[in-house]
Image: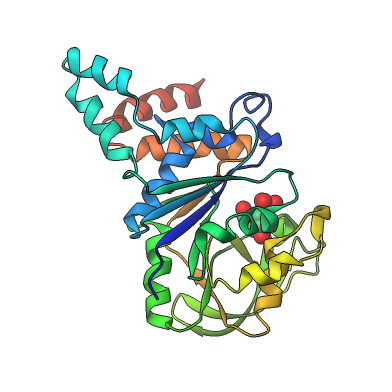
């Protein structure tokens, strides 16, 4: 099962981190020195993804600019001999023709956002990557999932999952756990944002999916669910009637960068993972902890 395309739903309003996201897309928030969206595109590239599909909305055009080549900047860096910076920009830029942008015209939910990508994805399995969830690990989360998908073969659907404390299950989609093989298990039920005390397990759906294209047919008529939105989880429940779903417990630290606390923690974690910043950051943090 070759996965060539990844869908990045980037139309969200980012209300949990206002006012930062009033005029700037939440996907452009910076972890250390790179916007969130760059991390997930890099993760997808590492996993072998060849085409990057962004489902955007109003006020998101800066994301498209970010993945374009900036001739003036390039020329200025070149004139000033800043070759290291030029190399970073060149490395981060997707190949010509490897990106597509489409708009979700109204905030109708994650399921609707994914459905907006149907014509660009076409009739092949694809990945969905939510940019506000970063996973610190090499190999990245999506690469681990694609490797698991290759082992499973056939018409499998996979979801990256992580155990969360029981009192937090109502914030997530939650999977029921069936037969297990190592870090992969059969999913025997899903529920989006279950009421306190009703979750089938503590395994939360994180922001990485590998889905079969039949999901689009279900999304087409999917009714609104939790939060009065068209939920991807509800469409996956529909698809699970005819196809297998597997949970993949990935290796790595998950960061919810769409919340203020998670965003701060991600900056520390990704900063500490950088050889050029680690020592200075450690000293600074020590100073603050002793205050
Ligand atoms: C979405 C999904 C949910 C998943 C979560 C992970 O919810 O609907 O199943 O657990 O992402 O971040 P949202 O956070 O958009 O409400």
Q: Quadrant of ligand 1?
A: bottom right
**Residue at coordinates 43% horizontally, 47% vertically from top-left?**
99
Left/right of residue 270 with respect to residue 186 in the rendered view: left
Quadrant in the rendering for residue 201: bottom right
Residue 205 lies, with reference to residue 99, above or below; the image says below
Of residue 37 and residue 116, the one placed in the foreground of this image is 116
The x, y position of residue 2, in whole percent, is: 38, 71
Residue 96 lies, with reference to residue 48, above or below; the image says above
**Residue at coordinates 33% horizontally, 60% vertically from top-left?**
48
Of residue 49 and residue 200, the one placed in the foreground of this image is 49
The x, y position of residue 225, in whole percent, is: 81, 61
Camera sees residue 29: no
The x, y position of residue 250, in whole percent, is: 45, 64
**Residue at coordinates 67% horizontally, 71% vertically from top-left?**
217
Camera sees residue 280: yes
Of residue 263 and residue 41, the one placed in the foreground of this image is 41
Quadrant in the rendering for residue 176: bottom right
Residue 236 lies, with reference to residue 107, above or below; the image says below
Q: Quadrant of the N terminus?
A: bottom left
């Amino acid at each position: 099962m070759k996965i060539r395309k990844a869908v990045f739903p980037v139309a969200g309003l980012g209300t949990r981190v206002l006012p930062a996201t009033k005029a700037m897309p939440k996907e452009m928030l910076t972890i250390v020195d790179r916007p969130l969206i760059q991390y997930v595109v890099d993760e997808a590239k590492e996993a072998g993804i060849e085409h990057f599909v962004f489902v955007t909305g109003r006020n998101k055009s800066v994301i498209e600019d970010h993945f374009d080549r900036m001739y003036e900047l390039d020329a200025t860096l070149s004139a000033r001999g800043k070759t290291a910076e030029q190399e970073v920009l060149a490395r981060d830029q997707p190949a010509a023709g490897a990106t597509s942008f489409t708009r979700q015209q109204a905030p109708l939910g994650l399921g609707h956002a994914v459905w907006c990508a149907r014509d660009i994805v076409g009739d092949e399995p694809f990945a969905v990557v939510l940019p506000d969830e970063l996973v610190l690990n090499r190999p990245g989360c999506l690469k681990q999932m694609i490797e698991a998908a290759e082992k499973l073969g056939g018409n499998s659907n996979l979801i990256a999952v992580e155990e969360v404390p029981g009192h937090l299950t109502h914030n997530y989609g939650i999977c029921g756990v069936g037969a297990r093989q190592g870090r992969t298990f059969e999913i025997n039920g899903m529920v989006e944002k279950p009421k306190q005390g009703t979750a089938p397990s503590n395994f939360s759906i994180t922001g990485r999916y590998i889905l079969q294209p039949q999901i689009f047919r279900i999304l087409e008529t999917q009714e609104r669910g939790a939060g009065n939105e068209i939920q991807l989880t509800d469409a996956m429940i529909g698809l699970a009637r005819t196809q297998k779903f597997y949970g993949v417990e990935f290796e790595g630290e998950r960061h919810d960068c769409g919340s203020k606390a998670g965003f701060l923690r991600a900056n520390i974690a990704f900063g500490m993972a950088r050889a050029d910043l680690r020592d200075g950051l450690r000293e600074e943090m020590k100073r603050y902890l002793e205050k």
